[in-house]
Amino acid sequence: MTTVTARQAPESDWPAAMLRRIDPSRNMSRFWSARLQPSLFEEVLLVRNWGRIGSRGQERSYWFSTRQTALDAFNKITAAKCRRGYAPPDAAAETVTHRTPQAHDWARDATRDNNARL
């Protein structure tokens, strides 16, 4: 019987989350992701990546000595992001609200005024 260490664990055993927050009225289009992965030194990494959708974003890694402490941190920060309005990509697409007609009319009027001055 062999024991499975963190480095030998199948990829599916390591949780990952991808969340988005989209709010056209605030020109907000953000992504946030987190994943747990094994390190080469029998530790566990929590890797976070965030930024504006369409950009590479930023990345930060946190080291944990045990998988359970890393999993607790992963669950805690994922829950915090969900409380702040982030949602999985499928759910985020459903909650997107399009620009209101009033905002659209304002943009059209501003363009018309600028063209009239030419």
Image (tube, rainbow, N blue to C red):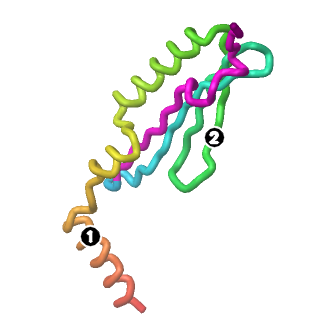
Rendered position, 65 above or below 46 = above
Q: Which mark is residue 58?
A: 2
Q: Is residue 20 magenta?
A: yes
Residue 97 figure quarter: bottom left
- The label on residue 31 is none
Whether 33 is among the magenta residues is: no
Q: Nearer the viewer, residue 61 or 45?
A: 45
Disc tally is: 2
In the image, is 97 to the left or to the right of 88? left
Question: For the residue marked with disc 1, what is the amino acid?
Answer: His
Where residue 74 appears, x then y in whole percent? 51, 21
Residue furthest to the front in view is 1
Quadrant where the image shows the C terminus: bottom left
Q: CA distance from mark 1 to mark 2?
A: 33 Å
Name the element at disc 2: strand
Which residue is disc 1 drawn over?
104
Bounds of the magenta segment: 1-23
The x and y percentages for residue 7 are 72, 20
User: Sequence order check: which comes first, mark 1 or mark 2?
Assistant: 2
Q: Is residue 113 left or right of residue 33?
A: left
Q: Amino acid at mark 2?
A: Gln
Please, what secondary structure does the residue beneath circle 1 have?
Answer: helix
* Vertical arrangement, residue 87 with respect to residue 97, above or below: above
